[in-house]
Structure formats: structure tokens, C-alpha cells
Image (cartoon, grey):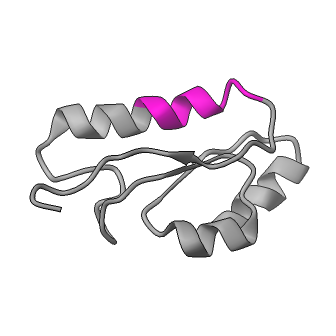
Amino acid sequence: MGLIARALEMGGIATAVVAWNGGRIRLVRVPRVVITRLERGVAFGRSGDEAQQRRVLEATLALLARDAPIEPVYLDERLEGG
């Protein structure tokens, strides 16, 4: 996903990526990325948790207004009990 985002950016298309695994995504140097503490398959939030999903989405969309590249944005979103 990160390499695709970089290629699109080179073509003039702004991208923003949501990731749950900051270690791997940082290696690719994605132009705009939000990293959560959630798990694989739920990078946008728990199923049915609209408030959490909205927070992740709004943080991600806010990146599109900024010039790339920028440092990763870390959200302290996590699953309950995590």
C-alpha cells in the first residue's frame, strides 16, 4: 500500500494511508500516514464503534490538507483492554 501511495503522489495525486503496524510502514516512507495501536484488520477501529472510526478517519483526511512528506501521525487508538 505504501509503495502505491508514493507512486500516486509522484503523479500529483494526494494520498493518506492508515496503518496498524508502524514498523513496516515507516520503512516505505509513505508521504502521509496515520498509525494506530489497533490490530490487523481493524486499522480504522472496532466494528460498530463509530466514534473511534470517525476519529481515525478525520485524522487521516486532515493529512490531505498538508504538503507531503510529513512525519507519521500516531493516534493512541486501541482495542478495549489493550
In the visual, does 42 lie left or right of 22? left
Prevalent SS, magenta region:
helix
Q: Position of residue 16 (x, y in %)?
A: 61, 45
User: Magenta part of the protein: which range?
Assistant: 58-66
In the visual, does 61 lie left or right of 78? right
Residue drawn at (59%, 75%), measured in percent from left and top? 24
Q: Position of residue 46 (x, y in %)?
A: 18, 52
- Residue 54's image quarter? top left
Count of number-bearing discs: 0
- Residue 39's image quarter? bottom left
Q: Position of residue 44 (x, y in %)?
A: 34, 50
Q: Is residue 61 magenta?
A: yes
In the visual, does 22 lie left or right of 72? left
Q: Position of residue 75 (x, y in %)?
A: 42, 44
Q: Quadrant of the C terminus?
A: bottom left
Q: Quadrant of the N terminus?
A: bottom right
Residue drawn at (63%, 49%), measured in percent from left and top? 72
Q: Is residue 10 magenta?
A: no
Q: Is residue 64 above or below residue 74?
A: above
Residue drawn at (80%, 40%), measured in percent from left and top? 68
Q: Is residue 54 above or below residue 45?
A: above
Q: Is residue 76 above or below residue 27?
A: above
User: Which of 53 and 8 lies nearest the eye of the viewer?
Assistant: 53
- Residue 53's image quarter? top left
Residue drawn at (42%, 63%), measured in percent from left and top? 20
